[in-house]
Image (cartoon, grey):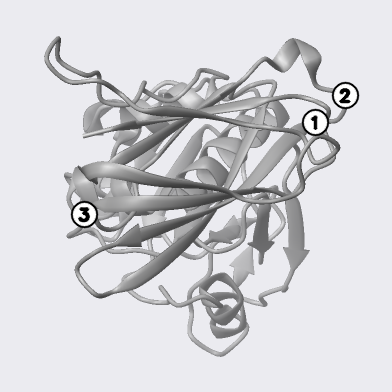
């Protein structure tokens, strides 16, 4: 799905050169629900910094664009003119589990951005080593791969899930949910189209689960995606966590990791597709 780009122009840029790098960063802040907009407005100030786009975890399929991709944003020092950069509203200190458990909308938007810019500039969706990025190779890298000449930063961090993001960017599907052992059974439910039932599917689960896998037969889709509202209940007293879950022709299997283990879930269809969706749960 093509990203919707909200234009918040920054005056902090220079003319660009021939682009060969797609560079991922973390903002080290701006992680609230309005993060990408707040960072975009920050880049409008006299701060001597910018990026082409800003991506947060709260706006699926939407990003903020601050600098024309053909120009040079001010974020990786000597590599500005050859780079197209994306700020992800997060921290380089995050572990792989934190990225994968909590940040799927952010990572999906990043993957789509990589896909779109790869097509625009003919840059391969290949993760470069530091020596390749600092040489003359074309591909994808992190800010940290550019070394001292790239401002000497450590983002997006050692825990960043490059394999997952690049798999999605290339049109792959996310990992399957945790598989049950022979001794345990993986509960599953079927979510009907709204034309069949317009009430939520409420499930009480035997013991805490950590992940929900959602699957749809994409050959039956009439419009680009399906969407459900998943409200997960944790019995630790923290209440409900709500996540919007999408499936589309490129992602017929989607895995969601709520912030906490859950013992119940309420699933509501919020699309008009005449297809059934299957959800299962893994420990």
Image-quadrant location for residue 259: bottom left
Q: Foreground: 122 or 161? A: 161
Q: Residue at x 31, y 43 (%)?
A: 205
Q: Residue at x 36, y 23 (%)?
A: 175
Secondary structure state at the residue bearing disc 1: loop
Can you identify the residue that label 1 sits on?
224
Residue 2 falls left or right of residue 201: right
Disc nearest the viewer among 3 and 1: 1
Disc 2 versus disc 3: nearer the observer: 2
Q: Does residue 93 appear in this view?
A: yes
Left or right of 137, for residue 243: right
Side of 14 where 30 appears, left or right: left
Q: Nearer the viewer, residue 59 or 137?
A: 59
In the picture, the quarter occupied by the C terminus is: top left
> Dot 3 corresponds to which residue?
148
Q: First in sequence: mark 2 or mark 3? A: 3
């Amino acid at each position: 799905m093509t990203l919707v780009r909200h234009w918040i122009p920054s005056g902090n840029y220079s003319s660009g050169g021939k682009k060969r790098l797609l560079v991922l960063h973390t903002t080290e802040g701006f992680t609230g629900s309005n993060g990408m907009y707040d960072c975009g407005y920050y880049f409008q100030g006299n701060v001597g910094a910018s990026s082409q786009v800003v991506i947060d975890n709260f706006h699926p399929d939407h990003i903020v664009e601050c600098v024309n991709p053909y120009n040079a944003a001010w974020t990786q020092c000597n590599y500005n003119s050859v780079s197209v950069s994306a700020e992800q509203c997060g921290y380089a200190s995050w572990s792989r589990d934190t990225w994968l458990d909590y940040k799927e909308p952010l990572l999906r938007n990043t993957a789509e951005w990589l896909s779109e810019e790869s097509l625009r500039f003919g840059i391969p969706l290949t993760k470069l080593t530091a020596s390749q990025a600092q040489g003359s190779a074309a591909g994808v890298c992190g800010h940290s791969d550019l070394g001292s000449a790239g401002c000497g930063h450590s983002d997006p961090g050692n825990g960043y899930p490059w394999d997952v993001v690049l798999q999605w960017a290339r049109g792959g599907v996310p990992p399957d949910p945790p598989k049950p052992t022979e001794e345990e059974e993986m509960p599953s439910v079927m979510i009907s189209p709204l034309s069949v039932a317009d009430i939520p599917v409420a499930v009480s689960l035997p013991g805490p689960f950590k992940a929900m896998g959602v699957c749809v037969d994409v050959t039956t889709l009439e419009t680009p995606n399906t969407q459900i509202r998943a409200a997960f209940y944790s019995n630790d007293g923290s209440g409900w966590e709500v996540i919007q879950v999408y499936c589309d022709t490129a992602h017929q299997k989607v895995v969601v990791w709520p912030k906490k283990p859950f013992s119940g879930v309420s699933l509501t269809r919020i699309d008009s597709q005449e297809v059934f969706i299957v959800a299962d749960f893994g420990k």
